[in-house]
Image (cartoon, helix red, strand yellow):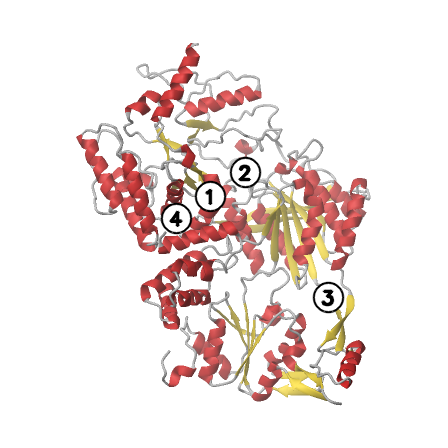
Amino acid sequence: MEEHVGQLWDKLVTRLSDKSYQEASISLSEIAKPLGIFFRALGGDNALRIVESTATQHYAKRNWKHRIAGTGKYIELSWQDEDTLHLPKQINTFADSDLNKDLYYWLAAINAHSLENPSAKARGLQGWFIYSQQLTLDVLARFPGLGTRYQRLVNAYLLLRNSDEQLNEQEQAQEEAIAQALKQPSSIEQLPVSQYAPKPVILWPHPNPPEVADLSRRKNSAEDDHNGESEPSKPKKNDQENKRRNAERVDMPDGKDGLILHRFESVFGFSEFLNVNRSTEDDDEADQDSADKNADDMDFLSLARDNNTKGGKVKFDLDLPAQSIDDVILESDVLLPEWDYKKQNLQKDYCSVVNMVHVSAEQGELPERLRRTAKKLRHQLEALTTKRVWHRHQSEGSELDLDAYINYVGERFSGHKVEQPDLYQQLRSSERDLSCLLLADFSLSTDTWLSNDARIIDVIRDSLFLFSESLRNTGDQFSIYGFSSRNRGHIRFNTLKTFKESYNGVVRSRIQAIKPGFYTRMGAAIRYAAMKLEAQDSQQRLLLILTDGKPNDLDRYEGRYGVEDTRRAIHEARAKGLQTFCITIDDQGGEYLPHIFGNNGYTIIRKPEHLPQKLPILYANLTTDPA
Amino acid sequence: MTNDSQSDIPFYSSQGNEEALFEHAYGNQLPVLLKGPTGSGKTRFIAHMAAKLNVPLYTVSCHDDLTASDLVGRYLIGDGQTIWNDGPLSRAVREGGICYLDEVVEARKDTTVVIHPLTDDRRILPIDRTGETLHAPNNFMLVISYNPGYQSMMKGLKPSTRQRFISMTFNYLKAAQEQEVIEKETGIDAPMAKKLVAMANALRQLKDHDLEEGASTRLLVYTARLIKSGFDPVEACLAGLIEPLSDEEDVVSALMEVVYASFGK
């Protein structure tokens, strides 16, 4: 009973204190795409992803309703860091949804622009006050059309700020200063001091954006990294509210010191980081729920890299798989550069590639279940084979088109005035001189189960089979390679079929033997593949990349570093005159893809199980001249 | 446009040393390749240079049905006889002048074979049909252009063709210069021209990521003309700058936000 009353009370006061307008709410997901374009057009960095921002504590005075309800401590503001632009998950500040939308665009505009000395930490509160005004002024000067929108927002916003709360003199002065700064940017230089932090200004960037303080630098040493990739064994849809949270990374206490409380006078809250064993419920679902609840209540999450991984949920390779006797190394220690976007330089001989081939005495067969599809696809792709046909009614040609000539003469004799028709025919072949290299991702993530009986790697295997089956008769030259990586020193390149080999039982047995492992250092793989393809003497050279996700590896090769290196590798390949195209089955992908491959350089297959049938068709579309 | 003696020369605002380079190439009978995005002034540059050097200009806009005989010429069947009819390339070689093959990658592959002998020191044009071999006079010049950003999987200039030309790259003009060009071309007032250029530069940042190509100077000129003749600026931008760049509805609406950022809403 008490609990029930408590819940009702909580609902009531929360509603009372809540001044947002849910019905006019605009959510980020609704307008993320146009907002991204707008952001980039106004000068925002192409490589940034837009994500929902974390609610951060603002330390400003709250009114009595908020205090009773225990709400209003957090606010979602906007800021950007190296990889991402953070925007509020939803905006429901104003009663008018157009205003809420305008606010999104305004936030994108000010974040697209940055001034000198962008470090927010160094600025401090006064710095933030001046910086925000200057930023506003600059943005309005560059895009004067935003002026009216800004004024509208400021007017509506100031009305909301003048709420019912009691302010003391200092607070009043602070509010007035902010109001003036909003109305006339750069007209005031000093923010009066008060006991509390000033009320957050949603029109300005975050005064003190949370940084993911990485206290335990990710070590490059191998011993820490042997954990391999840990991921849940079953792909789980997370329908719960996917809230982002503030986090820091701390060193994992070794636990030997025990729990000795030095600070006797202070009492530990449950949010402080302590390495004690908290009981976890056995049920995963319940565990997840209570963890979510706890996380909601915490101000700050501390993450530690633990060397112990929870059993059953982890798949890992502790070491290289035993050098299997049937893998023969074709080429090793091929040194390749890597692009460091932070330093903007190409690190010479940074990666080492080993090229190996699976040897087996067996003659592989095409799996029975694929035969029908293979046959169908072969017929469809026959159109790609070069054929010589007579083109009639040509203005120029090796022979007279007799039909056309007879018609022409006939019409002329009958007294018609006929325009000069095209009277020749020409035997022409639709010439095609094309080499295609298919580079497939064999990283561990392809080990994920798609359904009860197929993993991504199985789908990739089928795709490689059908691709080869379809292309064997077209006369196009093709080769197939796979790649995975474990750090920069060990990039594994699996040769499945070279350009010189013909598609036969040996190749089939190699395709049959592919297995997932390790990570995705895509840049080096693309560079190596480009070297192979470049040696091909064809008019058109196409590098097809088949992957299931973002570039990543154990060391810093993740996030923006990996994306930028891959992008660089693609640009290098294009500069060599190769055409590149990426086929991805990453259903959440998309944001980073245009940045790497260009607007028309990729496609996303939403349903991976369709890939085997789609790949050859896609290839046909890509390589057929629309004319 | 002024009515002095220069009035016949189309207006062109130099990006760098391209005029001098072109004159030297012309003087030394070297073929030239112009690279650059759509609407960056390649065609205008050639028109300008042809007028300046006072030579006839034969422009051929290449398309995917353009064959070698469209360039060289063909026999027409007349009343009981066949008559040879020169194509633009043969005419330029016979009479002297600049032959400009616009967007040459669009043409059929066999056309490049025809231009190869003209681009080395032989400077000849063999015409198989008539058995003639034309020798290019000193005032003949071959110019081709292509747009490297326009990535079609099956289209690209072969290295063997590319390596036969002196090449120059055209790019979008610097903001101040582009503004001047737009003012000169359309007579629009400076603040408006400035706004348009700022907006175009914003749109150009989206190239390769959200858009295939940025807004060209030509589109800016068109838009400025619409505005100059009294059309609503925002509507003019939609018609002249935004719609030509994308067919996707959400992209268009996002780009319109960029327009509003310049013109207000």
Earlier in the chain: of badge 4 and badge 2, it is 4
Where is the C terminus of chain A found, in terms of image quarters?
bottom right
Give the percent coordinates (x, y) of residue A325.
73, 39
Q: Which residue is mark 4?
A: A112
Determine the image quadrant of residue A83. Answer: top left
Query: Mark 3 touching mark 2, by CB under 8 A?
Result: no
Comparing labels 4 and 1, the label whose residue is closer to the camera: 1
Q: CA distance from mark 3 to mark 2?
A: 48 Å
Q: Which residue is mark 2?
A: A554
Q: Which kind of residue does numbered mark 4 sit on?
A: Ala
Q: Residue furthest front?
A: A415
Give the percent coordinates (x, y) of residue B94.
60, 88
Q: Which residue is mark 3?
A: A430
Labels 4 and 1 share a subunit: yes
Task: Find numbered disc 2 in the image and state the secondary structure of the residue it sits on.
Answer: loop
Query: Mark 3 touching mark 1, by CB under 8 A?
Result: no
Q: Tell which subunit mark 1 falls on.
A: A
Task: Find numbered disc 4 in the image and state the secondary structure of the residue it sits on.
Answer: helix
Q: Would you place residue A70 above or below residue A537 in this image? A: above
Q: Is residue B122 visible?
A: no
In the image, A31 versus A527, the foreground residue is: A31
